Image (cartoon, rainbow, N blue to C red):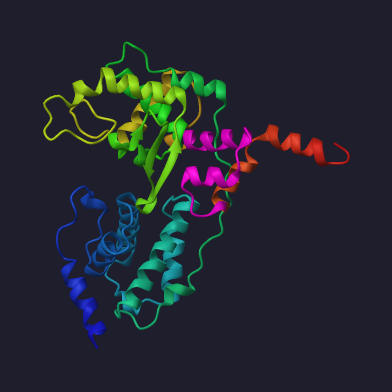
Amino acid sequence: MPRATEPRNRIAAAANPAPVGTPAKLVPTGPYFRAFVNYLRSECHLAENSVQAYSRDLARFERWLAGRRIPSLTIRDLSNYAQWLGEQELSPRSAARHVVTVRMFFRYLQLEGALKENVAELLGSPKLWRRVPNVLTAQILDKLLAAPAQGDPLWRRDRAMLELLYATGCRASEMSFLKLSDVHLAEGFCLCKGKGNKERLVPLGRRAADAVRAYLEHERPRLVAGVTPTPPWLLISRRGKRLARERIWELLKRYTARAGLSGKISPHTLRHSFATHLLAGGADLRQVQEMLGHANIATTQIYTHVDQGRLKAVHRKFHPRA
């Protein structure tokens, strides 16, 4: 049958060098693994960050294999792997993701005809507690968003970046790849591309629009001067390139320290704050789901448990002994 020979062809084709931008030490080297990574990238059209996460998980699995043949693995072997993950000082969430990656990998090999039986289907995933996200108050956010000062080389760009993170709820990777053509200041919205290249429209507030407008007028023209072709990205680095996701994290960390804020604050903290403040202000859960780009509303519902003031108001209104 043609399907029986296809896996060997695809696995052989996967022996090409790894894609540019993926660290060599995190890339699995075996042809089975490379074929799966190429499948995720070319046929599943996953975001590159997701592909690299799967690649790192497979590299760890390959290291554990240490020469074992995949078709000979039993459920006991895979259970030992799950136990080994627990010994690697991984967080429970990371360990659970590794298990899911292995299950997907074995399912792929079975569909391709490289495995007759998928023993990984018997491998259970650990149940995880859903953590309540960290949310900043409006007063703390004011201090953080005002942290970029005129003495900074690119303070208008950095202030626009922070304002956009909070105004749109974008992930750091989404902000990094936001194009100039995606931002419509006159209409007051921007087009964000999330996981799986799914697009969503998110309104822009007045403060965010003003910050972006100031950056576009005073700093971006200087950053792209002499760069050919003109980069399409909204946020530009000093060298005229796209502002990388890692750089966004670094800048946020710098301004968090400058504002004198304690605790771990990440771009996702601003995303959590965006959603929580919308719901606290009376926004509909479905509308917040759409603005966040969540496929499942259950993911958005976690924010309904964050605002304590809202919970207390509901309790006072409806509990007979409040």
Residue 290 percent location from the top left of the image? 50, 46
Residue 87 falls in image quadrant: bottom left
Q: Nearer the viewer, residue 274 or 112?
A: 274
Residue at 42 percent across and 31 percent down: it is 188
Residue at 16 percent across and 69 percent down: it is 13
The main secondary structure of the magenta stretch is helix
Is 90 in the magenta? no
121 lies above or below 20? below
Task: Give the magenta part as a residue range.
Answer: 269-297
Q: Nearer the viewer, residue 196 or 103?
A: 196
Observer able to see residue 245: no
View extreme (right): residue: 321
Residue at 30 percent across and 72 percent down: it is 68
Q: State which quarter of the image contains the N terminus.
A: bottom left
Observer able to see residue 298: yes
View extreme (top): residue: 151
80 lies above or below 21? below
Residue 208 falls in image quadrant: top left
Residue 113 falls in image quadrant: bottom left
- State left or right for residue 157 relative to residue 313: left
How many numbered circles does the render carry? 0
Residue 242 percent location from the top left of the image? 24, 35
Residue 229 percent location from the top left of the image? 13, 35
Residue 272 percent location from the top left of the image? 52, 37
121 lies above or below 3? above
Is 293 in the magenta? yes
62 lies above or below 19? below
